[in-house]
Image (cartoon, rainbow, N blue to C red):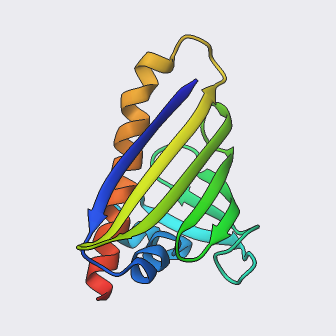
Amino acid sequence: MIDFTLTRTSTAPIETVFDAMTDHRGIADAVWAIRRSTLDREGIPAPNGVGAIRRLVAIGPPFVEEIIEYERPTRYAYRMISGAPTRNHIGTIQLRETGMGTEVSWQLRSTLKIPGLDRLMLPVFKRVIDELLKGGITAAERRR
């Protein structure tokens, strides 16, 4: 099993960071590694809440994810539906206000379908999540 948490801090207010991080259609504008991002289905609350299905295209098949938690402005989570050789792939993003802005922690828990590849894939997953995290924070800081 792969299980790690990455944390970064933004100078933007928590609501702005949350909205940027959950802008499923706009992810490709903020993250260099994502060529296209679309929202296949809106969630509740519309458009980015629980039940939303987002599609992220990088290299290879698209990553299709469903939003399973949405608690604006402090927490959301998603599960991978398809696009990666994983099962039980859950990302949980938590935000908290700090004296300087907003701290964002992204926890990823994932089980690979091919046993024994965890050590090889851990750095790849960390790089991807770090790029998404940095992209979301950059987008939030542009919105201020």
Is residue 122 among what the camera can see?
yes
Can you give x and y, in whole percent of width and height, for residue 53 in the image? 70, 64
x 63%, y 72%: residue: 71
Residue situated furthest front in the rendering: 99
Whether residue 33 appears in this view of the structure is no
Residue 34 % position (x, y):
42, 58
What residue sits 43% from the left and 17% below the top? 119
Total marks shown come to 0
Decide: is 143 above or below 114: below
Identify which residue, 116 or 34, lies in the foreground.
116
Q: Give whichever of 121, 17 is nearer the camera.
A: 17
| 87 left or right, relative to 125 | right
Check the picture and name the quadrant holding the N terminus. Answer: top right
Task: Give the image location of residue 108, x and y in percent.
Answer: 52, 42
Whether residue 122 is situated above or below residue 9 in the rendered picture: above
Q: Residue furthest bottom?
A: 144
Residue at (58% x, 77% y) in the render? 72
Q: Quadrant of the C terminus?
A: bottom left
Q: Is residue 15 left or right of residue 31?
A: right
Left or right? Give the position of 44 relative to 72: right
Q: Residue at x 41, y 82 (%)?
A: 16
Image spot of residue 25 (x, y percent): 53, 75
* Whether residue 34 is situated above or below residue 85 in the rendered picture: below
- Compared with residue 97, is residue 128 higher up or lower down, i.e. above or below? above
- Asked if residue 73 lies left or right of residue 77, the reply is left
